Amino acid sequence: MRIDRNTMLYGGLLVSGIFLPLALPAFQTQIAIMWMLVTFALTWDILGGRMGYNSFGNIVFFGVGMYAAAMTQHELYFDIGQFEVISDKINLQLTPVKYILGLGLGVVIGAVICVLLAWLLGSGVLRLRGHYFAICTLGLGVAVGEIAGGIDYIGAGSGLSAPLFPLAMGPAGLFYSYYFFILSAVTFLCLRWLYSTRFGLTINAIRDDEDKAEAMGLHTTRAKTVAWCVSAFFLSFAGAGFGHLNGFIDPLDVAFPGATFGVWMVLMAILGGKGTLWGPVLGAVVFHVTQEFFWSTLLGWQRVAMGLLIVAVVIFFPLGILGWVRERWPERFGITVEENA
Amino acid sequence: MLNKLKATASAIAITGLLTSAAAVAPAQAKVEGDTITFGVAVSLTGRYAVNGKHTKNGYDLAVKMINEKGGITVGGKKYKLAVKYYDDESTAARATQLAERLIQQDKIKFVLGPYSSGMTKAIAPVMEKYKIPMVEGNGASRSIFNQGFRYTFAVLSTSEQYLKSAIDLAAEMAKKEGRALSSVKIAIGVRNEPFALDIGTGIREDAARYGMKVVIDEKFPKEVTDMTSFLTKIKALKPDVVVVSAHTVGGALFVRQMTEQKVNVPMVAMTHCESAKVTDTKIFGTSAEGILCAGQWAPELAYKDDLFGSAMDYANTFEKTYGYVPPYQAAESTAAVMVYADAISRANSFDTEKVRDALAATDTQTFYGNIKFAPTGQNIAKPMILRQVQNGKYRLVAPTAWANSKLNYPRMTQ
Amino acid sequence: MIPVPSSGDRASAVCIRRKRRVSIDTIISNLNILYIAPPLILQLLVNGLMVGALFALVAYGMALVWGVMNVINISQGEYVVLGGYVTVLLADFGIHPFFGVFIAPIVMYGFGWVLYRTVIFRIVDKDLFVSILATYGISILLQQLMNQVFGADIRRADHGFVTWPFFDDIVTIEQIKLLGAMTSLAWGGVLIYFLKKSRLGQAIRATAQNARAARTMGIDTDKVYAATYAINAAVCGVAGALVAMIWVIEPFIGLIYTIRAFLIVIIAGLGNLVGVVIAGVSLGAAENFAGFILGAEFQVGFIFALLVIILVGRSYLLDRKREYLK
């Protein structure tokens, strides 16, 4: 195997993915969340960057996956009614085997539900174009979050507690750092493969001119729905993981936080450069680091800084970091610029 | 391609740099020198910002007083107290991340609670995971204490007790009027979040005990903007008691719209009267007359301790320092710090297990009330109080041992 | 070590099966209440209509900015709240807050103009999506600034108006809500007249139809955009003054007004004031009924679900004609 730059890049990432949480044990949860954000940006980019459908509602699949996995754990091991009574005999501790089993089953169920949901919703919502699609998905995200707050079965407004991470399995942050690293790696590789197939070309065609693509005989509706299902699939895993990591699931704050995670999905992909392969990854990393920096240094003013950053990025950096780089040095990307004679 | 490599590599480098910068940044944590630092994630922004401020002021005042009196003694040495704050922005996701940060990065060993049951419920599992004791004064929801947590201690009374005395009074009034208890109708309106939902559950249980009927059982969305449909239902079904727990915004809306829409119910009880400032005539006029307000504490109570004196002394000290009368949220935050400081000196060690055990064995009186923890962590030695707005002022009507006023019933029609 | 409960323990643990609220029953009983006491329907309807007129005003401002400048303003709600704060400050200084209906728009006009000159002018020629994100950033900024400047306490302006009771107090019409509705409609009327008759109004309409042609004709589109944005802010100021008197305001309460305005504009379409008014009052009434019948916890979710259903429904209808929503 030739050791070229590509291999170095992938190798470097693999190494950092494995060793970073071990080297910085105090930051394990932060690292886990960083990889989760990478997954967010990648899954958003399928629709937003590659297909031109800006979705503000991907958060629906995140939350559904979260609840599905947590409820699976509850249905398997706990009596739902336990939570009405105060007693010191009750606890949410599980053995590692039970926990992993529950989580495994939970993510499978969550993925199935999310893909079905994407298929169902897609048949209606994906008919909309442009900003109508964006607004509709925004409404969808809020609607699902509010409705979830009214369903008693999943805890309604009281929220749902995920089972406690088993003591025998070490620090939860470490486990979930790997969980999310593997998730984002798998997502990345799958998407890289997907974009190189005819399907990748189809969704690009949809972005460039949907009517022409349709006229050419491409099955646009099916392609759009499949793209959304792929997003939903990976997002459900992210949701399941985050719910278990956080320990407590609140419908509007944790499961369906449209105004935070939902919008960040969009921002990160744009920041890094939407439509590129590495753009979302870069955007997610830079965004997370910057945000954490604001939080620890600007107590009380961090949201002001965040607001300013969003405005600045959107206005001055619409192509994102990689997009901007591509404009400056197109040759490096293999694009030749014709000089007019 | 080269640029992809460069870009990603530099991103990773930046990550490394910034994270190590944050790592070596003042990690003023745990016990250093002669200062014990508590860690707190509190709501400085977001919808809980008002009470988050009260909580922070409560913590700060306690630390100030304890330090002025010389601090606490551990192992023969005197230590001062300090607090490290983060803003959880009133969201549970942020709160858990900050709790992790406090413990993992800042190496805090003693944590004080956030504001609201939702935040506390989110943080408690984190404390449990790392075995860090947390003393909190602002998370009353019963659901925090039925999950077997051993590291969370609450100085306040739990949520289902908030308006129990209101239902007891309703039963009393019904008996006086010669009515059957089963004919008493109750309307419940609670905000869709852990604390208020628990209050609703508590009312339903109390009503069931007396055989009263719950005719309206509403859950308000978190950002409630209008109570017209709820009030219209009340007009339709004419309940004898209305219980509302909708936090600050909802409480204010309820009081105003109840008067404006001419809704008359013989007994009205709610929570968060003080945060909603219902006695402020500029905002509410006399709309709040006769409303029963649940409270954890009031300055008129007869508790006292060596640090602050009586409850009234505390109120005066607080008002001198911060310029306003302390609501119970501030008082219970102060009490939390006092309990923690007391436990650390009793444990005579900074070992978290020993401190946890010392906390579990707490049995003391503070200006805020008696404090004794059940095995599940909640305070079982302090009753809730009920006050009624009479002539624009809060008058204590329950428990009867301390009552300085009789209940005005039925509530005068506005 | 904390003991793990075996299945045997589970069975014997004291527990109450969590009651699954049978929501169908609740809905039926709520409908029943309306059937028994029809004046309640009137109460919900009238209140909803009055309140809806206010929402329609905010929606109209949003439609204006959208139609003329191709900007979807997510910070609309924050302008409303700012207008509310102006009114509250007036009340603090002893001036009757109803004057806020005249003073707030003036203040907000200046504010909108400044905001345009500093930030908005950069996003006017970008695509719609960029405006959504940029104004979202602005809304976060404004919320936080208001929190720092005014504090997080809820504020309200006391207006001193009374309520007219009907039908034995079941139907109550609060004078302030009626005044609010009339004010909103009045301002709407002023706006239409202004757009039709004044030179600036005509310039705005020309720019909305075709910006390039307008420029060719000598219209300074930059000034037009600034004026449009400032007018929108002013209109929100009026709404904010009313909100501060009817309900309460606090720094983070803006989003719900933004979303409602959104909904109304989507339903009514751009450039259609009558449609906006009808959609606005219908939304106000629908909200109240949904809250009553389904239960208040579904009131907000209902509105958003409605948005989704309406959008999808309309696109389906268009699809049959082989068109799509532009």
Image (tube, coloured by chain):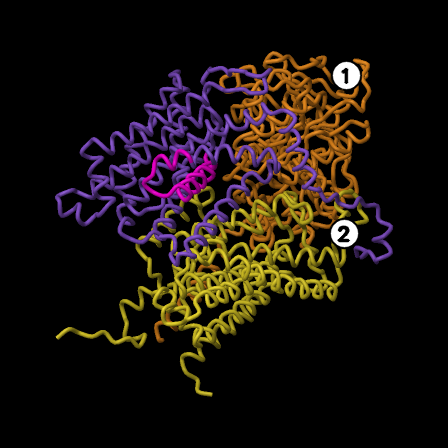
The amino acid type found where label 2 is placed reads: Asn
Q: Chain of mark 1?
A: B
Task: State left or right for residue B28 relative to residue C83.
Answer: right
> Quick check: is C263 in the magenta stretch?
yes
Q: Colour of chain B?
A: orange
Residue C323 pos. (x, y %):
38, 56
Q: Residue furthest front?
A: C321
- The quarter of the picture where the C terminus of chain A appears is bottom left
Q: Does residue C296 lie above or below A141 as drawn?
A: above
Q: Colour of chain C?
A: purple
Residues rendered magenta in the picture:
C251-278
The secondary structure type at the circle numbered 1 is helix
Identify the residue position indicated by label 2 in the image: A91
Residue C12 pos. (x, y %):
87, 50
For residue B356, say whether it is visible. Answer: yes
Identify the residue position indicated by label 1 in the image: B173
